[in-house]
Every structure is written in C-alpha cells, then in structure tokens.
Image (cartoon, rainbow, N blue to C red):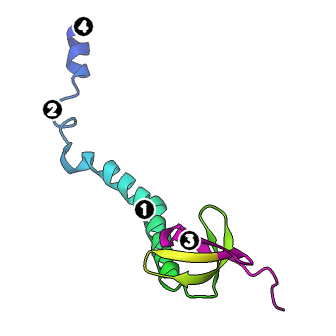
Amino acid sequence: MIDIAYALGTGGGASGEGGGFGAFVPLILMFAIFYFLLIRPQQKKQKLHRQVLSSLKKGDRVITSGGLYGRITGITDTVVTLEISEKVRVKVGRGNIAGLAQSENPKG
C-alpha cells in the first residue's frame, strides 16, 4: 500500500515540467497592470506640468508647491518672481510652481 502512495505522489514527469514561458505570464500581467494604473498616469501628469511651466508668462496667477498664491512679475529660465501682496515679492524656483491658480472672482 505504501508503495502505491509514493507512486501516486510523484505526479509523473510531464505535468510538473511545463515551466518556461508559462511561469512568466503572471509577472508580465502584473507589469502591464502597474504600467496602466501607476506609471502611465504619472507620466501624463508630469507632461502636463512641464507644459504649464513652459507656458508661464507675466501676469499669470499661480500657486507654488509650498502653498503661496501670487502673480508673476518676472520670469527667467529657472527663477520666477511672484508678487504675493502689494510691494511684497518673492523669488521661487520655476519647478516649484504647482500650477495656475483659479481666479478668485469667477466671471459669469
């Protein structure tokens, strides 16, 4: 009886050796899911942020990553001068601009 249990327990050689490409299918599927759920949306967000930074001009109202709201009074390739209050100006790195600020008085 014990000999039969050992013979049945091995499962034969053909069914256990199907590895190869089939072992990588779950890994490929996980990478595809990560790409479409995490990597691709982040790349789109970065591309949009670069477009916003490249289209900045004097007079735009912006918000910094630190939470300061201000109007652009001067701009160079790396530095943006913001007027946060009358006669109060600060210089911030261009990369620290989080985006354009919504207008406080919406028209309409």
Which numbered disc covers residue 39?
A: 1
Residue range highlighted in magenta? 83-108
Residue 20 vertical placement versus 107 (above, below): above
- N-terminal of the pair, mark 2 or mark 3, is 2
At 26% from the left and 45% from the top, the residue drawn is 23
For marks 2 and 1, give the CA distance: 41 Å
- Amino acid type at mark 4: Ile
Mark 4 highlights which residue? 2
Percent coordinates x, y for residue 98 in the rendering: 58, 69
Nearest to viewer (mark 2 / mark 1): 1
Q: Is mark 4 on a helix, strand or loop?
A: helix
Q: Are marks 3 and 1 in contact (CB under 8 Å)?
A: no
- Residue in the image at 38% along x and 59% along y: 32
Q: Which of marks 1 and 4 is nearer the N terminus?
A: 4
Kindly state the secondary structure of the residue where label 1 is placed. Answer: helix
Residue on which the image places disc 3: 91
Label 2 vs 1, first from the N-terminus = 2
Q: Which amino acid does label 1 sit on?
A: Ile
What residue appears at the point 30 percent right and 52 percent down from the top-left corner? Answer: 25
From this view, report whether residue 10 is shown above or below residue 94.
above
Q: In which quarter of the image is the C terminus?
A: bottom right
Mark closer to the chain start, 3 or 1: 1
Side of 34 relative to 106 (left or right) = left
